[in-house]
Image: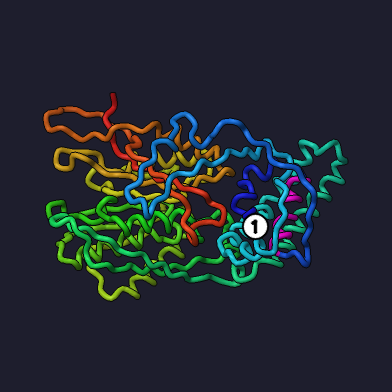
Amino acid sequence: MAPTVLLPPMRKTVLLSTTTVAEFVSKLAQIYTPDVLGTQPSVGPLHEEDDNALSATYDWADLSISNDSHELESPVEYPNVTLEHADIPPKIVLSDADRERLLSDEFERSYALRWLTGLIAHADEWIRRGEENGDNDKDVDQLQKQREGVIERASALLAACSGPSASGAVTRTFVFPLKITSPAQSTTASPSTVRILLKDDSLLSQDHTAVGLQTWGSAPILARLLAHSPQRFGLWPTPEEKNELRVLELGAGTGLLSILSWRLLQHRALSGHQLRQCLVLATDFHDSVLSNLESNIDLNRAHSQSVVPTVCIETRHLDWADCPHFSNQERFDVVLGADIIYEREHAQLIKAVVERTLKQPTRSNMSGGVFWLMYPLRHTHSAEIRMTEEVFGPVLEETTFSTNEEVVHWRLGVVEIQSLERRKGIGKGDDVSYRLLKIKWVKTS
């Protein structure tokens, strides 16, 4: 089992018993350093609930759509596994082929390293919780020594298997086929590609909470959709549409979606459409992430053959808990977010941010802006997925502003859902499926 599926979030890890955390460390040792720290303890299975939490309340899995059967697969039912109810990790017997696959998966490796780094960073809290709550009535001093021993083994494993991720950054090249349909003739233009260079920075030398230093699985999948159909996502304005566009990315991380949006609008301007002023604003919270993000933007500017000065890309620090108010003129036509909900409170924070940043419908722009949110369906984050469904609500009918309406009250609502399977070679090793939400302003009843 891959680390992305095996390991719980850190906020859950610090609540687990000594035995449970020790088993997780042993499982990682079994994968990454079998000759040094490898063990194969006999452990029991996880407990599973009967209901399907991923389609709770609104049965979103049944409402998925697909515009291209070749690119987008049917949704896969994903089991709900509740780690809070588990005492020990699931039994794993790794074949040589499985181990080789995991060893060659850099994303899985970086996820494991990040988890180990987080465990070490939260060592004091975990040890303190054990002292306060007790652990099978063990002597407190003995318990402290045992937990310190687990942290020492985690530190040794981190040093043993960190490899390239500890020594420096890795620059990746993403190539996306660009598929443009002419509005006039409804035919596909000559095929071309968009090439993006991204630096994934070292995790170990930075704040372990700065997960945006790495490119997560949802971003390349959403990026492929953007390049495949930029018209659908509002990134390919027609001559009849406005020549100004503002795009915002929340939790931009390494900047893949922002840089691709900028490149698409550059491509549109170079194809003859006069774009008077376009802005792509890539935002994040951590200084280390913003620094790497700016480096990636500069890297792609340097490798662009020509740059249209009226199509700009910028970065900005954004605290979701303290988002400024924007006038409707300053708001954004398109807001993007990929894999940005990994704590329960994130969904509500993000909704509040979008309410302040997404353009509302007006008589000159009757549809308003659109927020595209993509996230993976991970059983380790089922609570976060349920919270997302609760915050954004059921699927609603898309509405537009009518010129004969004097006053209209708006709220954010999901108007379209799309489920996608993980594509081979994209995303994390055991991600099964992803969910894409189209969220717009809808009239309140």
- Residue furthest toward the top? 445
- Disc 1: which residue: 117
Q: Is residue 240 above or below residue 197?
A: above
- The answer to which of 66 and 286 lies nearer the viewer is 66
Work out whether residue 238 can be spotted: yes
> Is residue 26 a member of the stretch shown in magenta?
yes
> Is residue 193 a member of the stretch shown in magenta?
no
Report the span colored magenta: 19-32
Snapshot quadrant of residue 134: top right
> Residue drawn at (31%, 58%), measured in percent from left and top?
228
Q: Give the image location of residue 113, x and y in percent.
A: 63, 60
Q: Is residue 405 above or below residue 223?
A: above
Snapshot quadrant of residue 164: bottom right
- The answer to which of 267 and 354 lies nearer the viewer is 267
Work out whether residue 215 can be spotted: no
Q: Is residue 15 left or right of residue 300?
A: right
Main SS class of the magenta portion in the image: helix
